[in-house]
Amino acid sequence: MLFNSFEFIFAFLPLTLLGFFIGAQLLPSGKRHWLRLYLVIASLFFYGWWNPQNLWLIGFSIGFNYLVGRWLGKETLPLGQKKGLLSLGVGVNLALIFYFKYANFFADNFNQFVGTEFNFGKIILPLAISFFTFQQIAYLVDSYRGETKNYGFISYCLFVCFFPQLIAGPIVHHKDVLGQFEKPSIYKFSSLCFSVGCFIFFAGLFKKVVLADRVAIYATPVFDAAAQGISLSFFEAWIGALAYTLQLYFDFSGYTDMAIGAAYMFGIRLPLNFDSPYKATSIIDFWRRWHITLSNFLRDYLYIPLGGSRKGKLRRHANLLITMLLGGFWHGAGWTFVIWGGLHGTYLIINHQWRSFCKGIGLWQEKTPAWFSILGWAITFLAVVASWVLFRANNLETGLQVLGSMFGSQGFSLPRGFSRFGFLTALAPLGIKFDGLQDLLAFSIVDSVKLIGALIAIALFTPNTQQWLMKYNPTLNEPQLGEGLVARLWSKLHWRPNQLWAVMGALVATLGLWHINRVSEFLYFQF
């Protein structure tokens, strides 16, 4: 069941909310564990809607990790046994991911290397396996460290499979979420929480079906053409790369907004997962803003255990590269994901080296001049766009072909209409042509440029969803607007429970619902 489907919006979500709060009114406070069980059952129904056969997998995963976590939490267990039990728990979790997600990838590469034809047959990737497995690995590690409490089984089940965050995150931490289900306040219906949650949910729906799905019509044909071996022009390649850059952001951040909104209707606050990442002025800044919960997981449970930055620069760089390579591999079984991760690891190493160099010669300042920030943003944005090409491409050959066209391997061909700009025609001696689009790419040049320009402006110059709601702080992280005149202006326009915002919210919801003409999956479902 998808968030952007009529059965979720008009049946599952309202009925689940209604049953929860009616039950909260009827049951005495001492029986509210039944409401948590009710949410577990509803969440498993939500998960099993797509493929009921996956229920055995998530059921096994929850039961196994709960038992291992309980044993790891025993203070009387000898350290040696704890280490062995933790290794067993993590090993079983990784084995599940390996089989369902990577078995055929390794088999195919092994076959190419030795010339065999071994394979595991067709393996259907279960929804959310990467998310709920990472979430529980973190729980086991924290249990080993003595950082978890003795939670009941129903509460643990709800921590793992609470439907708003189950399918594609955000990746929640036990200490942030489990305690919230113990609070009496969530069992009392709050009109404010419901209103805020609805606004965030429909803002996310708008991002997905109005913005992301719309710009996808310019990204998909470009990458499909490249996959067929068709050479792209300079303009075509950049349209495809920028369109996918914006599609991915508005699709994934839209899903996360819908998850945060749905959870907040129940009074549950999930962690912030996006903080305007395309405003980042460095690649370090980008990874503090993009898929924040995954970045935090990789930092806390991989980068720091590897040694972090505690053992010198060379070791730090190696740890960064290993972390990002594995982070790339987490996204999918393909060399393009591994190279994407390695590319971002290299970006981070260069960024750290640049900062060290600037500090060494006395040029580093916490508050940099405006021109320096703009230059940093431009370099960061271009680096991110280039990396998304590999992330999107079906294979390495396709990705390299698109990147080559972006940087002039097929010459510099622009749309015919651009010839009216004199400063461009003056560059004709340098090899710039005005050939337009290939017949295969049957989309409007004007519409594509307008939409991409508008979405870049939205990503760069408007607050994100949580910043609009910052007065009510619907996430576990407190968003910041920054400083300056523009920030002060936006701070005056934040969401309020009044008639004006009710009309605006209704308009956003109506546009979102109107555009659900076909149910399209969220991009991160495949990762």
Image (tube, grey):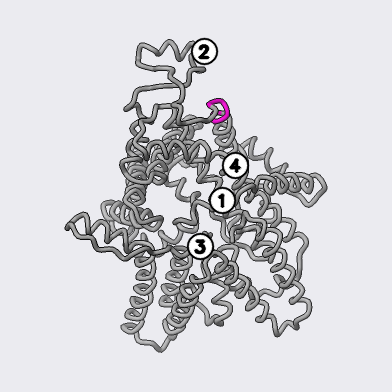
| Residue under the point 37% across and 53% down | 328
* Residue 347 visible from this viewpoint: yes
Q: Nearer the viewer, residue 146 or 324?
A: 324
Give yes or no for residue 446 being in the magenta stretch. yes
Q: Could you tell which of marks 3 and 1 lies nearer the N-terminus?
A: 3
Q: CA distance from mark 1 to mark 4?
A: 13 Å
The earlier-in-sequence mark between 1 and 4 is 4
Image: magenta residue range? 445-449
Residue at image point 76% right, 65% down: 190
Q: Which residue is mark 3?
A: 171
In this rendering, is residue 96 above or below 467?
below
Residue 242 screen position, x and y as percent: 48, 36
State which mark lies toward you, 1 or 4.
1
Disc nearest the viewer among 3 and 2: 2
Query: Are the residues tagged 3 and 2 within 8 Å (C-beta)?
Result: no
Q: Earlier in the sequence, mark 4 or mark 2?
A: 4
Residue 354 appears left or right of 217: left
Q: Which mark is residue 420?
A: 2
Reply above or below: 242 against 438. Answer: below
For the C terminus, the quadrant is bottom left
Mark 1: amino acid: Ser
Closer to the N terminus: mark 4 or mark 3?
3
SS at circle 1: loop
